Image: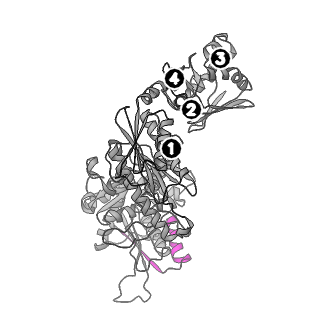
Amino acid sequence: MTGEPTTHDTENTPAGAAEDTGAAGGDRASGGDRPHPGDRLRPGTAVTPLRAGLHLRGRRGSLTLEGSTAVPVVWGLLEEPLRTGGLAGFREGLEPGSAVRAATDTLLGRLADHDLLLPAPPAAPHPDPAVARWIDATAAHPDAAAALLTTARAEVLAHDPNSPTATAAVRALTAGGVPVTLTPDPDLPPDRILLTVRGTGPDRTVAAGRGGATGYVTAPGSTAQARADAAALEARLTHAAHAADSTVDSAAAPQHRRIPGTFAALLAGAAAHRLLCAAARLPDPATEADDPRLLPGIPTVLLADARPARADHHSWLGPERIDADRHVRLAPPTGLAEALRRITALGEHRLGPLPAPLPGDLPQLPVPLATCTPPAAGHATTPRTLIGGGPRLDLARLELFCRAAELLLGETTFTVGADPGHARGRALRHTAARRLATAPHDHPPPDPAHWSGHPQLRHWWTTLTGRLAVPARLEVHRAAPHAHAYRAVVRRTPHEPGPGRGPGPLLGEAVEATPGDAAAFAALAAVTAVRTAAPGGTPPPPSGGAAAPLATAGVPTAAWEDPGWTGGWLADLAGREEALQDTLHRLYGAGPTTTPPAPAPERDSGLAGLLRSFGFTVLHTPEEAR
């Protein structure tokens, strides 16, 4: 018999094992706490017999047991005692040491390991049978949850107590077994309601409402936090709706002056559900679907649309972080995929303060491209569209996100990175390129015979000068005698070269640990500049292989992936990154720390604080922090 949970862990375990390695969802995890005669099947568990096994579906996951045609037979004997609370009598009738007793205990152990068993019915269940069934189906500790809900009292604040959302919230809370008081609040916007529960510890509040055509439900928090979150959500959702109306015919998506009844019931029911779970110390509904887009540790907001009907949760931190759980600071991402998950959360098109870099309709050959349009910053009145490229699309997206964040923070004052090493690598390269651009080249360049055969350089240089037919000149210089740091520059060849004429316009530059790497990244930057068609524009500061350690973390490199393959090249770059940063730090006197001292959470507000909360690194002042 084997157990296969379908939440995260997919490893099967032999039936004779003492413990199962599948993910357990409650307090009856694998180990010494084995099932006892008072156990019963968690209500709501659906069972499908298989030819040689069994499939069980619980509220928070599922489990497959297979390997013998006896499994469905044993279940046929066991199901009724489990559902009716008669397990004790059933087990007493089984002979100790028999094969049936062993199979029964093994099956019960798998159910216990996957949170599908509950203790005997509580001595004092919730007085409402429907609420008691819900608690049994959800809670790891039904007794404690029922006791909390029995003492809970709720209040609903609404501008109009007779509005569909307010009356639906009262119905939902009442159905949850909690007495409700409905109170008018003329200061609330017409579409917003506040639900508060008291008597189970600190008061907890959620807000529900609408901005534009999109409804929302905030994460549970203090009343002040719920009000602040609601105001910020309504402002952002309304702004997103106006932006969409400017590009889409507004007649195609009619706006309702009043929330439709079914939509009001959805929002009110979701708000009541979150509040009841908070009151009973049950898992938040946002965690039940195991949505990989959600970031553990970051509060979530529910967004809902009426046309088409859709509701899902999103990781979100508002601009006013009042409660302690809003002062979260995630650890830096451990890999590129995790960094992109956080970028997606920060770039949600209705909520995010930054746009998510996406390929859009840009061509992806000969170089992967991404684009985004951050809001206008500083004294600018119109947004500035950014386009960037990279060896791969994921790397291009990461680089473009960091550039967009820097543009909003102050392009010459901050450097952003996915982790401290990435931010430091980008900052050191920017400083080195700026210094070397004005430094005299009083020592001979490295011999091209030693680096011109780099496979990535050959690819990108051939693309630039052959496929794109761009006349260009490549120069490589050493940063300092005996230093393992090089700057490469690609310039367009002037149409009429001659005495007195300056060099052609800059197409790309790079600072790397070897001349071949520097030349390859400079050629790649030049191809990107040509494909983005920015006449007269200045290419962005070089970042090169700063993201290589992040891109290769936890990613095995095949034996055949030499530097001609992007994966092999990134692995080589990652191995040289730390030494390169040390060299650039020694040459240009960058600050000794990779991040500035962490400010107090309550003072770490604004975009920089939000980026740090999501685990990104923000460095101050190029000369001091870089």
The tag earlier along the polypeptide, 2 or 4, is 2
Q: Give the spatial CA distance, label 2 vs label 4.
A: 12 Å
Q: Choose the circle earlier in sequence order: 4 or 1.
A: 4
The residues colored magenta run 453-477
- Element on which disc 3 rests: helix
Left or right relative to 216: residue 19: right
Q: Considering only vertical position in the picture, is 294 above or below 74?
A: below
Distance from Cα at disc 2 to Cα at disc 3: 20 Å
Of badges 4 and 1, nearer the viewer stands: 1
Q: Secondary structure at mark 1?
A: helix
- Nearest to the observer: residue 232 or residue 485: 232
Q: Earlier in the sequence, mark 1 or mark 2?
A: 2
Q: CA distance from mark 1 to mark 3?
A: 45 Å
Q: Nearer the viewer, residue 105 or 497?
A: 105
Mark nearer the viewer, 1 or 2: 1
Q: CA distance from mark 4 to mark 1?
A: 38 Å
349 sits to left or right of 616: right
Q: Nearer the viewer, mark 1 or mark 3?
A: 1
Label number found at residue 22: 2
The residue positioned 61% from the left and 35% from the top of the image is: 62
Q: Secondary structure at mark 4?
A: loop
Q: Residues within 10 Å of mark 3 (few under 14, many from 20)?
A: some
x and y, in percent, of residue 22 in the image: 56, 32
* Amino acid beneath label 4: Gly
* Cβ atoms under marks 2 and 3 closer than 8 Å: no
Q: Which mark is residue 102?
A: 3
Q: Amino acid at mark 1?
A: Gly
Name the mark on residue 31.
4
Element at label 2: loop
Q: From the image, tell me which residue sits under label 1.
A: 269
Q: Please, what is the three-letter code of the amino acid marked with disc 3? A: Ala
